[in-house]
Image (cartoon, coloured by chain):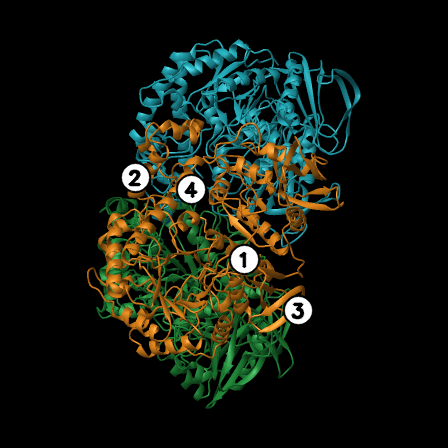
Chain colours: A cyan, B green, C orange
Amino acid sequence: MERKILFPQVDGLLHGGDYNPEQWLDRPDILEEDVRMMKKAGINSATLGVFSWAAYEPSEGEYHFEWLTDCIERLYQNGIYTILATPSGARPAWLDQKYPEAMRVDSYGVRYHHGVRENHCMSSPVFREKVQNIITRLHGAAGDHPGIIQWHISNEFGGECYCPLCVKRFRSYLKEKFDGDIEKLNHAWWTPFWSHQYSDFEQIEPPYQNGEYSIMGLKLEWRRFTTWNMTDYMNFEIDILRKLTPGRPVTTNFMQLYNGLDYRVMAQSLDMISWDSYPAFHNDYESLADTMAHNAFDHAVMRSMKKDRPFMLMESAPGLVNWHRFNKLKRPGIHRLFSLHALGCGSDTVQYFQWRKSRGSYEQFHGAVVDHLGTDDTRVFREVEKLGEELKKLKAISGSLVKAKAALILDWDVMWAVEDMRGLSDETKRYAETCEEIYRAFVRLGVDVDVISQTDPFDDYRVIAAPMLYLLKEGVAERMSDFVERGGELLATYLTGYVDADTLCYLNGFPGDGLNDLFGIVSEEIDTLYPTDRNGVSFSDDGTEGEVRDYAERLRVKDARVLGVYTRDFYAGEPAVTVRQKGRGHAWYLGCRMDMAHTKELLAGMLDNAGVERKDLPPDVEFHVRACDGHRYEFYFNMGTETAAVHGVTGQDLLTEKTVEGTLVLESMGAAVIATEREE
Amino acid sequence: MERKILFPQVDGLLHGGDYNPEQWLDRPDILEEDVRMMKKAGINSATLGVFSWAAYEPSEGEYHFEWLTDCIERLYQNGIYTILATPSGARPAWLDQKYPEAMRVDSYGVRYHHGVRENHCMSSPVFREKVQNIITRLHGAAGDHPGIIQWHISNEFGGECYCPLCVKRFRSYLKEKFDGDIEKLNHAWWTPFWSHQYSDFEQIEPPYQNGEYSIMGLKLEWRRFTTWNMTDYMNFEIDILRKLTPGRPVTTNFMQLYNGLDYRVMAQSLDMISWDSYPAFHNDYESLADTMAHNAFDHAVMRSMKKDRPFMLMESAPGLVNWHRFNKLKRPGIHRLFSLHALGCGSDTVQYFQWRKSRGSYEQFHGAVVDHLGTDDTRVFREVEKLGEELKKLKAISGSLVKAKAALILDWDVMWAVEDMRGLSDETKRYAETCEEIYRAFVRLGVDVDVISQTDPFDDYRVIAAPMLYLLKEGVAERMSDFVERGGELLATYLTGYVDADTLCYLNGFPGDGLNDLFGIVSEEIDTLYPTDRNGVSFSDDGTEGEVRDYAERLRVKDARVLGVYTRDFYAGEPAVTVRQKGRGHAWYLGCRMDMAHTKELLAGMLDNAGVERKDLPPDVEFHVRACDGHRYEFYFNMGTETAAVHGVTGQDLLTEKTVEGTLVLESMGAAVIATEREE
Amino acid sequence: MERKILFPQVDGLLHGGDYNPEQWLDRPDILEEDVRMMKKAGINSATLGVFSWAAYEPSEGEYHFEWLTDCIERLYQNGIYTILATPSGARPAWLDQKYPEAMRVDSYGVRYHHGVRENHCMSSPVFREKVQNIITRLHGAAGDHPGIIQWHISNEFGGECYCPLCVKRFRSYLKEKFDGDIEKLNHAWWTPFWSHQYSDFEQIEPPYQNGEYSIMGLKLEWRRFTTWNMTDYMNFEIDILRKLTPGRPVTTNFMQLYNGLDYRVMAQSLDMISWDSYPAFHNDYESLADTMAHNAFDHAVMRSMKKDRPFMLMESAPGLVNWHRFNKLKRPGIHRLFSLHALGCGSDTVQYFQWRKSRGSYEQFHGAVVDHLGTDDTRVFREVEKLGEELKKLKAISGSLVKAKAALILDWDVMWAVEDMRGLSDETKRYAETCEEIYRAFVRLGVDVDVISQTDPFDDYRVIAAPMLYLLKEGVAERMSDFVERGGELLATYLTGYVDADTLCYLNGFPGDGLNDLFGIVSEEIDTLYPTDRNGVSFSDDGTEGEVRDYAERLRVKDARVLGVYTRDFYAGEPAVTVRQKGRGHAWYLGCRMDMAHTKELLAGMLDNAGVERKDLPPDVEFHVRACDGHRYEFYFNMGTETAAVHGVTGQDLLTEKTVEGTLVLESMGAAVIATEREE
C-alpha cells in the first residue's frame, strides 16, 4: 500500500478545530491571545467561516471580508492552516425575510419560520443564486490565500423539505426513475393494495404525516430522493468551488450513521471523508470498552467510504458537549484515548468543535479548548496541549491505511426499509445496532473490518458478514454466490432477502433471489419474541447453548449442515444455525438473534476457515493496524480499569519511544502505537 | 329456539376470507393455483373487492370489471361463494386529486392529504355521487351473479371529520336535537359555567383540539354526531344496494369495542353482524385463558347486537398480524382453538384476512393462508386445511344460537362520558376493561352473558350486572326497579348514576334518578386511590377479605343489608358492599373496585338467587352453549397447559365422533363440541 | 410592626369562596338555600362574576345585571361581603364569532378556535374595547354597592400569544429595550453565533416552535415580553377600575410558581396578593410534612411579594380537585390543618373554589362546600362549618405579619434562563425544586424565610441563600459583597453567576461579575452526573459525609476555607464546600447538589453566625410566627402520624383558649396558635 497524504502543506497529522473570530471582532486582544494559545496547544489548522454568512453580508449586497482575510493571514504567519467553509449552513435573517421560499416546509405541509440552521430548501433557485454569489465573493476576497488547504461544504447536511418545489422535483425524479411509465411505478409499489394505483405522476405526493404513509415504496423513494436532492444541492456548491479553485480538496462533515441521508451517495462527490464524533462517555448503560468499540464502528463506516485514504475527525469535544441527555465531563485521559483511537481507526486528523466557547446562544456551554475562563491552565487545555505534543511523535503514521480482510454489509436502503416495514416489532428491530454488535464481535477478535454496501465489490475480502439484509438488490445474490465459490466465508442472518430494491417480496422462499440455494435453507416463518421471551441454540460441536432474543426464524434445511438447533418452544430441535460448503468457501446462516459470545464463536470459525489472523486480546483491549510503504503501525488501547498485558508484540512504541519485545504492558486508559517493518 | 341460517346457499359453516385477485392479474398461474389451494383448504367463500375501486375505475370514467366477473365465476364453478364489497374503503388517487373535499379535515382544522384508507368525508356530496356511480356500475357488471351471497359495506368504518361540511351538519343535528332552542342546549350543556352560553347555533364548533374541549355535553354530542353521520353515510350505501339487490343481506365489519362509533346504532341497518378479531396471543401480560376470555367478551358484544342469529367472524389472522407491538407467531393448535371458540361464542363463519399475502405495501407481512413462499405445505396452510375438515363435521351447529340468562350492561355513551369526565384518574378509569373483567368472572362461573345497552329490554334475563353506569338515561332507573321487583338480581357499582344523558349531574344523591332508593344507599363521596394504595372489604358472612384498588365510595345506608365493610383508612368499618331485597329480587351495590375472586363470589350469589345454572369448571377451561330446534351443543375449551377433566358431560363429541358419558378429558389446547338433545 | 388590615369592613378573617348564582337562576330555592348554608358555615364573603360575561351580555349589546345586584344585596343583608370579578377570564361565543382577533395564535402560528378560557389576545384593541364596555356597565349596574370590598381582575392570567399584533408589539418592545440599535441587540444575543445577526428589528420573530428557538436571549426576552404584555393588559383593566372606584383594592389570583409570568412584575400593580393553592395531599411520592412544607414555600413566595400586608388564599379545594393525576379525597382534619397553615404563613383569608358544584361541564366534579347531594350534613360541609367557627377565634391575628430574618433568592428570570440553557441535563436541572428544598431545610430549622428577587433589597435580612443563581444581574454581586461585609451570611451554590441579564457568559471565571472574589473560589468546570452516579462530600469538622447527586463543580480555591472535599471520582480530595470571611460576614459556597441533612447543617451554621434564632422541633412539626403591635402569634402544626411535644412554648392557645406553659402537646394533624406579648 502506498502512503496517501491528505494535505501536503501540513507536516504530519492535522490538529485543529472550528474557530469563530467573527464573534470577537470587538476584542482584538482575544484574537491575539487565540493565536498564542493555539501555538501553545500545538494547533496547526483552524476551520473558519462555517456560520459566517451574516458576518460577510450583514444586509443584502453589503460585504465584509477583511476580518476573515486578516485572520487567515495571522494564522498563516503563525504556521496554522485554514480549512475554509462555505457559509450555507445558516442563512442571514434578511434572506429569509426577502426570500421565504428558501425556508423548508415540514411534513405536515407548513412552512417553517426563520431560525436555527441547516434548514434551507435544497430546491430553491433563489437560494442557490444567493449561495453562488456569496461563495464567489468569498473566493474573490480570500479564496486564493496559500494558507487555505481545504473547502468545507456547508455543515452537517440533514433534514428534508416538503415544499411545492421539492414535491415537483420528486415527481420528476420518479418519472425519470420509472421511465415515465406510471404502471411500472404501480407495479413496483404494489399499489393495487388498498386501491392505491396512480393514473398520473402528478397525483403522487411525498409521505406527508397527514397523507400517504402506507406505501412502502413511496416512503423508500422519498428517502432516496432526499439524498438525491441534497447531493444535487451539495454538488451545486462543489461545482462552483472546483471552477474557482481546481485541485483544492472539498469535504463536508458527516454525522455518525445519520439516518436521513445515504452518505455513500454523497461521498462520491467528496475528495475526502470527514465526520463529527461525540460519544457519551461514562454513561449508565454500557462499558467504556463498548462506547469505544461503538465509536470504532462509526470510524469504520466513515473510513470504508474512501478506503484508499485516511479520513478526518472533523469535530470532537475537547471537554463535554451540551446536547447529550446528561452532559458529563470527560474523565482525565479520555481525550487522549479517544483521539489516538481515532488515529488507530484511520483518521489523519484530530479536530475540535470548538476552539473557544461562544459567549452566548445555543452552544455557549458546548466544550471547547478555551473556556469562558479564558486561561491556558485548565484541565481541558492541558490535555489538548499534551495531545498536541504526542501527535508530533506520530507524524510517521500520516497517510498510512487500514487494510481490512473482513467486511460487514450495512446499507442505508436496508436501514430505511427495515425501519418502515410493518411487522416484527418497532421496539426491537435495531438494524444498525445489530450490525454494530457484530462489528464489536470482530473487534473482540482483534480483526479490522470494513463497513460496505451490498453493491460494493467483495474482492478485497475473505470474510463477509451481512446481518439482516432484508432488502436485497439485483445481482447481489449472484455476487455472494461467486464470493463463496471462490473461497469466501459469508454470514447471513434472519431477515435476509425478504424484499427487492422496490420492497416487493421475493416469491418462492426467503432468503430470496436464489440465496436460499446458496445457504441451502428456506425460512418458513419468523417469530417475534416479547422482550421477556427467550429461546436457546444448542450447538452439537461443543455442547454449549447460546441465548436467543427478539427474533427466530423457522428454517427448512434443503442442503446444509445444522450447527445448532433451538432448545425451546414449539420449534425446539429445529435448525437455528447452519453452514453450507460451496466451492472453496462456506455460506453460514444464523436464523436468530443470538448472544455476543456465541456470535463471536461463529465469526472465529469463519476467520479461521479463511485464514484471517485474529488476536488473543485481554478483555477491554482494542487493536487496530494501519500500514503503508512497508511500515506497519499497531495500535493498542486499554479501555479497562486494570493494567493489561498483550503478548506477542514487537516493535517500537512511537509514544514512549521505547522498544517492545514480546509483551506490551498497558495501564488503564493506556495506548501504544507500535511501529514494525512487517506490512501485510 | 328456531335455527337461523345466515346463508341458505352454503351447506354448513362458512370458511373463507379476503381475496385480492386484482393484485395478480398479470399472473394467471397464481390465480389458478389459488382456486386449487382454496379447495384443498376447504374454503367455500371469498370476500372480493374490498379495496378495488382503482382496479374498477383506474381513471375517472374508465371501467374494468372483467377480471372481477371472471373471478366470481371461476370461484363459483369450484363451489366457492363470493361476498362482494363496495369499494368505498379507499379512494383512487384521481378522485382526491380532482375532488379534494372528499378528504377529511383533522381536529386541528387541517385537511388531510391523499393517502391511506377509511378516511373519506362522510358528508361530501361529490364523494357520495362517486360512490353511487361505482356501486351502480359494479352491480351492473357483476351484481346479479348467483355466486354472490352478501354485500360487505366498505371496510372497518372509523374516524371523524372536522371539515366545513361536517361542521354545518353538526349544527343542523344539534338544532334538531334541541328543537331549535339554543337555551335548551345551554341548559343541557350547563354553559353558564365559564361563560360558555351560545346565543346562536352558528357559534357552535366541534371540539377542535385547539378550540372548545371543555364542555362535556358538546364532546358527547360530537361523538354521537360522528356515529350519526357515519351511519347516515353507511345507510346511503345500503339504500343503493337494497334497491339494486333486494333480499341480499348486507353487513359491515366491526372492530372489537372500537371507541369511535356506537356500533349498536349502526347495527340497526345491517342484516347481520360481522367483526374482525385479532387477539395478541402468548403476550407478556396475561394468560392464554384471559386472552381467550377477553375475546369471548368481544364475541358477546357482537353477538348481542343481533341475538336472534349467528354473527360472522369476518376477519382473523391465519398466522400472525403485522401491527401488534410484538407480532408473535400463533403457536400450533391456536388457530384451531381460536376458530372453534368463535363458533362456541355464536359465530357461523371462520374467515381470514387474508387468503394470500400481498407482495408489497403496508400489509405485506400480515399473516395469510398462503405465504410468499406460495406452497400448501406450510405450517399455517396445514392448520387451515385441517380446520377446514373439522368445520365440515360441525355443520349441525349452523344456525344455532346462544341463549344467555345473564346480561352485562356496557354502553358507548357511558364509555365516552367516563372517558371525557374530568375527575378520578385518567390512568385508572378503565370502564370497558372493568366490564370485561366482570364478564370474565361470569365466564369462570360457566355462564353465558349478553352484553347489552341500558336501553335494551331486560325481559330475557334473570341476572344483570351494570358496572360503572356513570351516565344513566331517562327511564332506566325505573326499568331496573321493575326488573328487581319481578325477581331480577341486579348489580351496580361505584360511579353509577352520576349524570344524565346530557352529562348533567343528578342532584340529591348518587346513584341518581331514584336508584339510591332501589339500592337503599347514597354515595357521599368517591375516593380515588393512588396505584400503590390498597383498601380491603371484610365480608361478615364468610370472614374473607377482598382487595380494593383505584376507587372506593363512602356509602350512607338508607335501607340495605351491609355485606362487607372497608378495613382501612378513615372509612374503615363503613359499608362497602350492600344488598337490598325488593319484591322478588335483589339490588346489589359494590361500592369499590374489588378483586376478581370476590367479585365472582358476589355474582355466584346472584346467580344462585336467580336459579341460573352455573358450572364447576377446572381452571382455564371455558364453556359455552349454542342451541336450537331441541338440539344443544356444548363447547369446551382447555386453555391451560395441563390436561383437564370436566365432569358431568354427556353426549356426542362432533369432532371425535365419540360418545362422552360423565367425564370429558381435554388435552391442553383441546376443544370439544358435545351434542345433546336437551335444549334450555 | 403595625397591623395591616386588608378589609376594614370585615370583622376578622375572611372566609368565603367563588360563588356562581348565574348557574341557578331558574332555581330560586337553591339560591335561598345557599345563603342559609353560607351563614351556617360561617362564610362572610363570596367571589362573584368570575365567569359571568355571557350572563351579563348574552348577545352583543344586550345586558342583564339584575340577577347580580339581587345576589349582592341578598348576601349583604346576611352579612356576606362580595369580591367582584371583572369577567374577562372567558369571552362569550358571540365575541369570538364576530371578532376572531380576540383569540390567540399558538406557537406554531395557528389561530385557536373559540373555547375554554383565559385565552384572549392581550394586544387586541377590539377585545380591550369590549372589556372596557362590559366593566363600565358592570360598574354602572352594581359597582357602588357597599357590600363590594374588592375587585378581582380576570382570573388566573396565563399563556402567550403569537398573533401578528403581538409580534408587532414584541418588536416595539425590543426596539425600546435596545434603544432602537439593532447592533446592541446583536451583541446582547450573541447573534454572530450560527450567523444569526439581524439587520432590522422587523426581521425578529417570536420563538416559534417551527422557527427560531436557538437564541437564548430571544427566548428570554419573549418570556419577559409576555409578562410585560400581560401586565399591560391587566393594568388596562386596573386603570378603568381605579377611575370608577378609587380606593377599592384590586387583586388577581396567582397560581403557585406559575412559570409563564413573572408575578413580581404584575404584583406592582396590585393592592394585595392572592393565590390559588391546590396541593396533592396523601400522594405516593412524599410525606405529608413535605407536601405542607412545599405549600409553605409557595405561601412564602406570595407573601414576600408584599411583605407589609397579609396575602389572600383566594382559592382552595374544600374536598378534592378534579384535575390532579389522582384526585384523592382530603382525609379528615386536612382541611383544618391546611387552612390554619395558610394563616400561619401569612394569609388573612380562607377561600374556596367553589361554594357549590356546577351541575355540568368541565369542573362538575371539582370539590365544593356544597355537593350535588345538596345537604349540609356531608363530611366536607361539616369540616368547613367547624373551621368557620375556629376562624372566629383567630380574629386577633388579622393584619399581623411574618417578619423573616432570612431570605431565599428565586427569580423568574433565572428559572427561565436555566430552563432554556443548553447543557447539564434537562431531567435534573430542577431550579425551583432546588430552591424549595433549601426552603424546606429552613423550615425544619424553625425559621421563616422570605422568597425574594436578586434585585430586592437585602437590608432586612441577616441570612440569604441564593441557590443556582445562574443569571446574575448588574450590581447584584456588589450588593452581595456589601451584604456580607456588613455582617450578612450568604450562601451560593454550583451554577452561580454563569451569565448576565442577557444570558451572555461572564468571562474570566464563574461565579462572575466579581463573585469569585467574594467567595474566594473559581469554578473551573461543572460535572453532570447520571441519575445513578453518586459522589460524596467529606466534612473535616465533624467527619460526616454528605451525598452528592446530579451536579458537582470543580473549584479552584483562591482565598477561602475548605469545609468539605469530594470523596470520589477523579476530583476526590478537591474542595466541594467553602467559606470565606469578609468583613463581619461570611460567603459560603456549596459546589454540588448535596443531601438535605447536610444542607441543613450548613444553614444552621449560617443562622448561628448571624444570631438568628432557630428552633429544635420534633420531626414533622412546622412552626411559623406572625406579629404586630406588640403581639406575637406562634403557629405549630403537627404533620406527623404520632403525637408530638414541643418544648419552650408559652402563651395562650387561641384555639383551645387554654394557656400553654413550657410544653405544647400536639396530636397528629393538630395545630395550635399561641398568642404571646413578645414581639420581635
- Circle 2: residue type: Lys
Residue at the spot of label 3:
C661
Q: Are marks 2 and 4 in one subunit?
A: no
Badge 2 vs badge 4, beta-carbon distance below 8 Å: no
Task: Answer left or right for B309 relative to C339.
Answer: left
Above or below: residue C96 compared with residue A437: below
Q: Marks 2 and 4, Cα distance to the nearest angstrom?
A: 45 Å
Could you classify mark 1 by the number of other residues whose Cα lies within 10 Å: few (under 14), some (14-19), or many (20 or more)? many
Whole-percent x, y for residue A678 in the image: 71, 15
- Circle 3: residue type: Glu
SS label for mark 3? strand
Residue at the spot of label 4:
A216
Above or below: residue C87 compared with residue C659: above
Observer able to see residue C74? yes
Q: Chain of mark 4?
A: A
SS label for mark 1? helix
- Circle 1: residue type: Ala
Could you classify mark 4 by the number of other residues whose Cα lies within 10 Å: few (under 14), some (14-19), or many (20 or more)? many
Whole-percent x, y for residue A207 in the image: 38, 41
SS label for mark 2? helix
Which of labels 2 and 4 is toward the front?
2
The single residue placed furthest to the right in the displayed view is A662
Q: Quadrant of residue A461?
A: top right
- Circle 4: residue type: Met
Residue at the spot of label 2:
C168
Residue at the spot of label 1:
C296
